[in-house]
Image (spheres, helix red, strand yellow):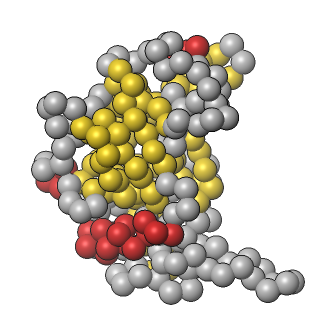
Amino acid sequence: MRIVVAVLAGVLVAACNAVVTSTAVFGPDDAAGAAGLRDGVWTAGPDAKCRYSERAPITAWPDCASRLVIKGGQWMELKRDGARWSWDSTSILLAAGQPMIVQLYVPANTETAATFNYAGLEPTARDGQGRITAFTGWQVLCGPPPPDPAQGQPKRYGTLTPLPGLTMDASNDDCTTTSKEAIRNAALASRPWDRSPTTLHWVRDGAI
């Protein structure tokens, strides 16, 4: 199991059964034909349990809201710890194709080396210049989620049947590949397995 930066939701989540690579599979040439995400303030939702006015500055939004700012290849989440504010920044590359692929760079920490993680992205709205202003995103998985274990048996996190072109790691938690085609095919296959895909939408220009 690895900790991945799920900037689609603007939070840190524990993810398993995920495609993880040690080097970038997609590069600038893959992003060249992609319609970009509009820079500015983004958030998730709507959520009936988290009500607030999007017109207010993001520093006035409740902590249940996703405070995400997209600027070029950086996705930045504004977080609050008491009276202290801080930004968490993640480098991403948006690759063109069907579906579009978000390649997320996850820096090294004291426990793990730097990695790249992947999500599928489906635009749901664009502005007059063709920039994406809303989308649905989902994690690219190694294969169908494993069944729940029998009583008394240990839980398995990775799939029992990895998709073509994907190789499970030694722990059978995640998988890896060097193939763009394998990642894109896995993204297509993974969409029905995500019971709660992330939805994000653009709010306004600027960073606050």
Placement of 107 over or under 101, stated as above or below:
above
> In the displayed image of the protein, which residue is found farthest to the right?
152
Query: Which residue corresponds to the image point at 20% horizontal and 60% vertical from the top-left?
Result: 97
Placement of 98 over or under 62, stated as above or below:
below
Q: Quadrant of the N terminus?
A: bottom right
Name the one closer to the observer, 24 or 182.
182
Query: Which residue corresponds to the image point at 55% horizontal and 70% vertical from the top-left?
Result: 17
Horizontal placement of 155 versus 112: left or right? right
Placement of 84 over or under 196, stated as above or below:
above
Name the one closer to the observer, 46 or 63.
46
Residue 127 location (% of width, % of height): 22, 32
Placement of 14 over or under 20, stated as above or below:
above
- Rendering quarter of residue 156: bottom right
Give the tally of numbered discs: 0
Q: Is residue 73 visible?
A: no
Q: Is residue 82 visible?
A: yes
Horizontal placement of 22 versus 174: left or right? left
Residue 15 location (% of width, % of height): 58, 60
- Rendering quarter of residue 155: bottom right
Residue 46 location (% of width, % of height): 53, 35
Name the one closer to the observer, 100 or 87.
100
Query: Which residue corresponds to the image point at 40% horizontal and 50% vertical from the top-left?
Result: 136
Residue 179 location (% of width, % of height): 28, 73
Query: Which residue corresponds to the image point at 43% horizontal and 66% vertical from the top-left?
Result: 191
Q: Quadrant of the C terminus?
A: top left
